[in-house]
């Protein structure tokens, strides 16, 4: 069995699921999801509460691990107490592996694991599922069609040299964890990225997506056709928003795994993806393995 501990927002959960899916498929094991961290609403410092977001996709493995399975495979009791003697003895016999890695570094040796395993960490590199990219794309097919209110917008995106420009602010500006680890990439990055796109793309049109669209309207003014995508297009768990983003032909993304997945899932054959040169203000995090080689960093 492969059990994945899901943490963070949608983008983080997608990376965690993708690696778990890879190991389960390679080793012909059952994949189960540990939602205990997402469901725990006890007050925690520097934590933004999240929901289980993968329900917006047609993921084939949506089996939730029981408390007993989580305790057995992780070696950690759900109530923080010591495991009982029977479980402890069984663990010694079967040796399930508890892998913990909160770095952003790619470890190829993890892909060689064949034992039963409990995965806890970020695993934010496309290299963790590079051999089964098409399978992962199928896992992340949206359950619902584009909302009727968004049909006209979707057509405009499809019919133009559309550029998804995504701006993430809120938690990266207001929350301690976001400010101190990620940090907002600032306006100059976007102006430089748009300049680059103008040099490479014929008649580009900007579609600006953001969790703070009012700030974007006041601060991001470009000499290109621009449309600000309003919150009415969000849909359930902002799934409609993400789906509209994936329809774009080119991308300017911030240091956000949500935007990363929008760019990665896009089926545009000649897409240009611009990403920040510095993904995190916390220099202790090495995100080199997160960004595909074909993407441009500014």
Image (cartoon, helix red, strand yellow):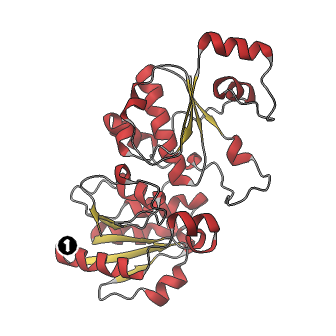
Quadrant of the snapshot with the C terminus: bottom left
Q: Is residue 297 above or below residue 121?
A: below
- Residue located at (32% from left, 84% from top): 225
Q: Quadrant of the N terminus?
A: top right
Q: Residues within 10 Å of mark 1 (few under 14, many from 20)?
A: some
Tell me if residue 179 comes above or below residue 222 in the rendering.
above
Tell whether 197 sits left or right of 53: left
Assign a secondary structure to mark 1. Answer: loop
Residue 8 in sight here: yes
Q: In which quarter of the image is residue 100?
A: top right
Residue at position x 66%, y 30% in the image? 65
Q: Which of 189 and 225 is in front in this view?
A: 189
- Residue lying furthest front: 284
Q: Where is residue 266 in the image (x, y as percent from the top left)?
A: 34, 55
Quadrant of residue 223 in the image? Answer: bottom left
Nearest the eye: 73 or 222: 73
Q: Label 1: which residue? A: 201
In the rendered image, the vertical position of residue 203 relative to residue 127, given as above or below: below
Q: Which x, y percent locates residue 179?
A: 57, 70
Looking at the picture, tell me which residue is in the foreground, 33 or 105. Answer: 105
The residue at 59%/20% (across/down) is 96
Image coords of residue 3 (percent x, y): 59, 30
Give the left or right position of residue 147, taking residue 84 as reference: left
Up-down relation of residue 176 to residue 24 (above or below): below
The residue shown at (44%, 24%) is 113
Q: Residue 22's x, y, as percent?
A: 43, 32
Please state which of residues 53 and 87 is positioned toward the viewer in this rendering.
Answer: 87
Q: Left or right of 214: which side holds 287? A: left
For the question of whether residue 58 can be seen, the reply is no
């Amino acid at each position: 069995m492969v059990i994945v501990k899901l943490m963070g927002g949608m983008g983080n959960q997608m990376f965690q699921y993708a690696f778990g899916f890879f190991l389960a498929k390679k080793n012909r094991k059952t994949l189960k999801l540990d939602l205990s961290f997402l469901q725990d609403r006890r007050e925690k410092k520097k934590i933004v509460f999240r929901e289980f977001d993968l329900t917006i996709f047609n993921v084939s493995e949506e089996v939730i691990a029981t408390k007993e399975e989580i305790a057995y495979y992780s070696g950690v009791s759900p109530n923080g107490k010591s495991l009982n003697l029977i479980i402890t003895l069984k663990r010694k016999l079967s040796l399930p592996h508890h892998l913990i890695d909160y770095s952003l570094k790619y470890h190829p040796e993890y892909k060689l694991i064949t034992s039963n395993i409990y995965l806890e960490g970020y695993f934010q590199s496309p290299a963790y599922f590079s051999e089964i990219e098409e399978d992962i794309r199928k896992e992340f097919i949206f359950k619902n069609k584009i909302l009727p209110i968004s049909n006209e917008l979707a057509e405009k995106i499809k019919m133009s040299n559309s550029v998804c420009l995504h701006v993430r602010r809120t938690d990266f500006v207001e929350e301690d964890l976001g400010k101190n680890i990620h940090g907002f990439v600032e306006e100059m990055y976007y102006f430089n990225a748009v300049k680059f796109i103008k040099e490479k793309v014929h008649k580009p049109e900007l579609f600006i997506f953001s969790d703070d669209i009012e700030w974007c309207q006041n601060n991001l003014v470009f000499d290109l056709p621009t449309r600000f995508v309003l919150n009415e297009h969000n849909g359930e768990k902002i799934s409609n928003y993400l789906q509209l983003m994936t329809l774009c032909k080119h991308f300017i993304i911030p240091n956000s795994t949500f935007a990363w997945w929008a760019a990665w899932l896009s089926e545009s054959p000649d897409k240009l993806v611009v990403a920040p040169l510095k993904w995190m203000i916390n220099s202790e995090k090495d995100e080199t393995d997160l960004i595909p080689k074909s993407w441009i960093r500014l």
